[in-house]
Image (spheres, rainbow, N blue to C red):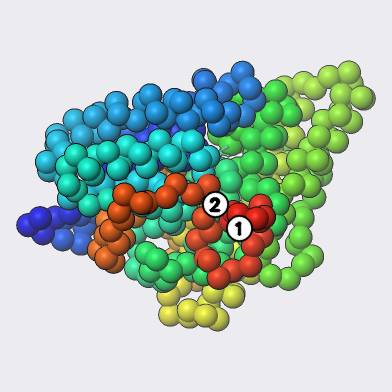
Amino acid sequence: MSGTLTFLGIESSCDDTAAAVVRLHGTTPEVLSSVVEGQTALHAAFGGVVPEIAARAHAERLDGCVEQALSLAGLDLSHLDGIAVTAGPGLIGGVLSGVMLAKGLAAATGLPMVGVNHLAGHGLTPRLTDGLAFPYLLLLVSGGHCQFLIVKSATEFQRLGGTIDDAPGEAFDKTAKLLGLPQPGGPVVEAEAALGDARRFQFPRPLLDRPGCDMSFSGLKTALLRTRDAVIAEKGGITLQDRRDMCAGFQLAVAEVLAEKTRRAVQIYLDLAPSSAVLAVAGGVAANQALRGRLEAVSAQLGLGFVAPPLRLCTDNAAMIAWAGIELFQAGQRDGFDLQARPRWPLDQNAPAMIGSGKRGAKA
Ligand code: KG4
Ligand code: ZN
């Protein structure tokens, strides 16, 4: 290995087929390539991700993504030290496609294989991009998840609180759908919001009256539906400006709730880890500039450092999986051919289940 570790990463847990090569030189990581093939067009007619279509597309495209990632890095399989693959949580057909490919590559090459929790991939990204030291407070905010975690090591995450129902990304996606905008909703709602008046329509700020840093976002989409229907009832339809104003009001409500809950999470965190005052954000919704701005302001007010990865490493990608694989490999993890694809896989196994818990255990 001569002082370097080079890992291929494979990601296929939702609707992005991705492969990447990350190299660690001593203590400095470098993303040599990162290929992300989105599936937006495949799911557009259905208004959301269709798991069977996603799984088939992953199975068809993963090989090509891996070839492209290797070729862009100027490497072949013989230059790798290991293969990292998302083994959950996510849509099981897609996760299986990635895990089966990783097993095939590991069997053919004899390379070690490391199964990565997709959420750990997001959560460890601030170390890839900014070399952040453990521990740090993380707000993980994506299409399926929203939690405050203390990241203590590559394998230890302590959840301080999170959403009790929808994730913010889901709320952005539903807002887009209700307003006739395309998926994924986050970027388009953000673009519309930039042209709107956030104070024209009032949206609730759920759970702000409760202590702690648990959150709720499902009421926001109901509020948006009511607002939209009230405008339609009054004027017979919604104008472009109505839509922009609704997007702006909705986004402001999400950003204000997340900012206030972050304030509270920071207090809890500083009581537990006073010497390590850094807030990091990760996950697709962390690509939202309005949200980043607010979180940065909260951090500055409370005297915390603030780390937000570049946008392309906030949304789903395989560089974060390759990087988490390197971290886990260094911590001694090696997986065998019995590596399971897991639809549910909470990062903090000790925290009580919050959403989606059932016979199969906690989802988040
Ligand atoms: O992390 P991610 O790529 O996939 C999951 O693991 O969920 O997050 C996808 C989510 C989607 O719901 C998408 O609408 C949201 O992130 N998103 C955004 C923005 N970009 C992506 N939400 C708000 N503002 C954005 N700019
Ligand atoms: Zn994700």
Which residue sits at x=56%, y=63%?
148
Q: Is residue 323 above or below residue 241?
A: below
Residue 208 is situated, as x and y percent measured from the top left of the image, at 75, 62
Q: Is residue 309 above or below residue 229?
A: below
- Residue on which the image places disc 1: 361
Q: Are the residues at dot 2 and dot 1 in contact (C-beta closer than 8 Å)?
A: yes
Name the side, left or right, on which 353 lies relative to 55: right
Which residue sits at x=40%, y=35%?
97
Q: Is residue 199 above or below residue 53?
A: below
Q: Is residue 355 visible?
A: no
Q: Is residue 166 visible?
A: yes
Which residue sits at x=67%, y=30%?
176
Residue 353 is situated, as x and y percent measured from the top left of the image, at 64, 62
Check disc 1 and report its element: helix, strand or loop: loop
Query: Hey, which quadrant is residue 324 in on the image?
Result: bottom left
The answer as to whether callout 2 falls within 8 Å of ligand 1 is no
Residue 219 is situated, as x and y percent measured from the top left of the image, at 78, 47
- Residue on which the image places disc 2: 344
Category of crowding for the residue at label 1, using alpha-carbon neighbours closer than 10 angstroms: few (below 14), some (14–19), many (at least 20): few
Name the side, left or right, on which 335 lies relative to 220: left
Type of amino acid at the residue the image marks with label 1: Gly
